Amino acid sequence: MIGVKIYHTVEVLRRKEKSIRKIAKLLSISKTTVQKYLKLNHQEAMEKFSSPIRKSILSPFESDYTKIIENNPKLRASKLYQKFKKSHPDIQISDRMFRTFIRKIKHNTQPKL
């Protein structure tokens, strides 16, 4: 995502007739990077900078844990991890990966003000 933003910024600044050196200084990137981005056409840049969306091992469980967290927002990720390990011993994941998964769900379920 950062590459796409920088690519577009380079394009805009070049259209405003900024020099390659000035663009590099403004964006804190090298001149060769600016030149490389200017050589790319739009289609090539989108292909280069787009990253595939990868699914997590825990993706199939997201809706289940979303419901659990909505009902028990104070429930700790460590307790959920222990229950997950008991109910799914065949899935090998670290507690850190599980906490990150739960943090993402908690962030998405927070009420928007």
Image (spheres, grey):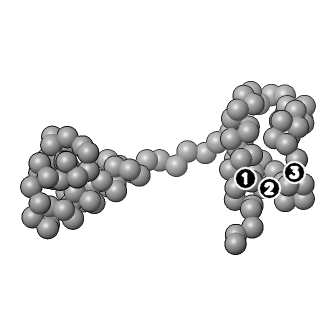
Question: What residue did someone put label 2 on?
Answer: 66
Number of the label disc, if any, that sits on residue 20: none
Task: Specify the amino acid type for callout 3.
Answer: Lys
CA–CA distance between discs 3 and 2?
A: 13 Å
Question: Which class describes the residues within 10 Å of circle 2: few (<14), some (14-19), or many (20+)?
Answer: some
Tag in front: 3 or 2: 3
Residue at coordinates 68% horizontally, 50% vertically from top-left?
104
The answer to whether mark 3 and mark 2 are in CB contact below 8 A is: no
Left or right: residue 21 versus residue 86 is left
The answer to whether mark 1 and mark 2 are in CB contact below 8 A is: yes
Question: What residue did someone put label 3 on?
Answer: 74
Residue 92: percent from left, percent from top: 74, 27
Q: How many marks can you see?
A: 3
Q: Earlier in the sequence, mark 1 or mark 3?
A: 3
Decide: is 33 above or below 110.
Answer: above
Number of the label disc, if any, that sits on residue 105: 1
**Residue 60 showing in the rendered view:** no
Local secondary structure at mark 2: helix
